[in-house]
Amino acid sequence: MISWAAPGRINLIGEHTDYNLGFALPIALPERTIARFAPADTDVLTVHSDHLDGAVDIRLDTRPGDVEGWAAYVAGVVWALRAAGHPVTGGTLRLTSTVLIGAGLSSSAALECATLGALTASGPELDRITSARIAQRAENEYVGAPTGLLDQLSSLFGEPRRALLIDFRDVTVEPVPFDPEAAGVTLLVINSHAVHEHAGGEYAARRTSCERAARDLGVASLREVCADDSLDPVRDPVDARRARHIVTENARVHDFVAAVRASDFAAAGRLMTESHASMRDDFEITTPHLDAIAASAVAAGAFGARMTGGGFGGCVIVLVPTDRAGSVTDAVEVAMRDGGYRAPTVTATHAAAGAGRVRTA
Ligand code: GLA
């Protein structure tokens, strides 16, 4: 029996920059998915999940379209591994998870990376960049979601008390010390419980907009555009706003890293709030519900707040002086009640380890 764990993530800053070959700064979360694999001499992988009854049989020669629903992420990994020339053995895969599903915390990447780790543990070691690309291919081409590399790299490279500065053009990951607790600052995750609808189509539309803007600007990707370059050549005004988010967001990632390195969490918080405004006004991926959470946290004395993840639902993250965490939580709860929204779940969190083998006693 092989057990492999892979965490969910939150992105501290740098949203929708991954497929624009820019920068992001995620952390891995303490919550994780565990895949327990018992190999057997068969051409079928039988998958069980603690969230769902029954089992799903995946043939090792599975092709995109064969399997749907949550098991498609597992089938996608089987397919992408084999397509990359890595042998996969059949058997039984049991999945358990503490990563919330549909909350924008990358439960899908946790599932892909735990599966990939468990299925390849007995073979030659796969480096983490290769693993991330295989898991991304599973998601892009088997599941059909045109996502970037952010979630998989976060899950695979996570480290305790470190954030990960990712450069998506060079595909490098640089750990950056991130330990707000040691400075008397708390990182809160506020789950709105709003699960996004039509988010898939909106995500793809943002991606297309960014690609069009890059073409109008004559660059290979929006990564090549500097903060003071003119966006006038972008013909469509909506595309221009999308591009402005990406360009300013890339700059904010670097400013945030500098602030965190200087233990200036007040400045880091301000950048988070600016990032939220950019996602709200230029990229248009927030919702009035998420805006209300972020605004009420900041009004109650947080250093800053922003939605994290793909958008249209999910979670808001907040940096707050620890002695104000209680009053900020209360204020957000009151704002949600007054606004007629569902009660949020507020949790303090921290940067945790990335994917790896689970040693069983
Ligand atoms: C989702 C995608 C990522 C990334 C984020 C936005 O989580 O899976 O690749 O694009 O949205 O930053």
Image: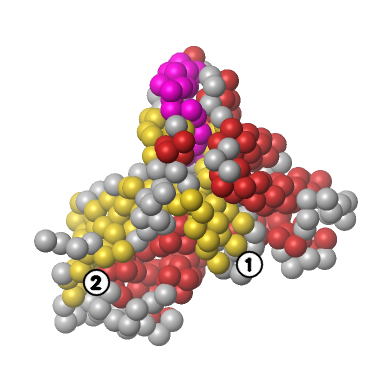
Looking at the rendered image, the quarter that the C terminus falls into is bottom left
Query: On the picture, is 184 further left or further right than 288?
Result: left
Left or right relative to 322: residue 263: right
Among all residues in the image, which is located at the extreme left? 361
Q: Tell me which residue sits at (78%, 66%) in the image.
A: 219
Would residue 300 be seen by someone viewing this image from the given angle? yes
Is residue 161 positioned above or below 298 on the image?
below
Residue on which the image places disc 1: 169
User: In the displayed structure, does residue 117 sit left or right of residue 90?
Assistant: right
In percent of width and height, residue 301 lies at 54, 22
Q: Is residue 325 magenta?
A: yes
Residue 45, disc: 2
Q: Which residues are magenta?
A: 312-337
Q: Which of pointers 1 and 2 lies earlier in the amino acid sequence?
A: 2
Q: Position of residue 334 (x, y in %)?
A: 46, 16
Magenta-colored stretch includes residue 27: no
When the figure is inspected, residue 230 is found, relative to residue 302, above or below; the finding is below
* Location of residue 117 in the rendering, given as x and y in whole percent from the top left corner: 32, 69
- Under circle 2, the secondary element is strand
Residue at 62% over, 36% down: 267
Residue 245 in percent (x, y) is at 70, 46
Which quarter of the image is occupied by the N terminus? bottom left
